[in-house]
Amino acid sequence: MLQPIHKQTDADRVEFMELVHLNLFPKFPHNFTFPLVEDPNYKPQTTVIYVFVTALICFFITSTAVCLRLWIRYRGKFGIDDWLIIPAFVCQK
């Protein structure tokens, strides 16, 4: 289980509630209590696996698209956009 990097403190809670009172979060419930205050053993849900799978799928789609484009252009003539797609593709990782 992942542990929070920074354990939530009372000062953090006060600072957050000050932001709420400034109406930065208009739909925030007025009777909100922090879960760690009610239950010290509270473990927040994590969505890391969903983010990882989504990034992996996007990586394979873009890799396939770039490789197919460069393969098709290799048979013809490279333009400036083809030369620029290579550093853009490398920088996305």
Image: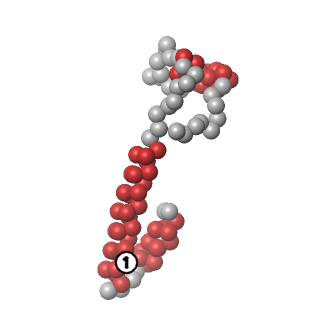
Left or right for 91, reference 57: right
Residue 67 spot, x, y in % from top left = 37, 74
Give the vertical position of 76 relative to 35 (above or below): below
Q: How many marks?
A: 1
Left or right for 35, reference 51: right
Q: Nearer the viewer, residue 39 or 58?
A: 39
Determine if residue 66 is in view: yes
Q: Residue at x 34, y 80 (%)?
A: 71
Q: Nearer the viewer, residue 17 or 39?
A: 39
Give the vertical position of 85 relative to 60 (above or below): below
Give the vertical position of 21 relative to 84 (above or below): above
Q: Residue at x 37, y 57 (%)?
A: 57
Location of mark 1 (residue): 70
How many residues crowd mark 1 within 10 Å: few (<14), some (14–19), many (20+)? some
**What colour scheme was applied to this rendering of the protein?**
secondary structure
Q: Residue at x 45, y 77 (%)?
A: 83
Give the amino acid at mark 1.
Leu
Residue 1 spot, x, y in % from top left = 52, 39
Residue 37 spot, x, y in % from top left = 58, 18
Q: Secondary structure at mark 1?
A: helix
Q: Residue at x 38, y 71 (%)?
A: 66
Left or right for 29, reference 36: left
Which residue appears farthest toward the top when viewing the image? 31
The quarter holding residue 13 reads top right
Determine if residue 23 is in view: no
Residue 73 spot, x, y in % from top left = 34, 81
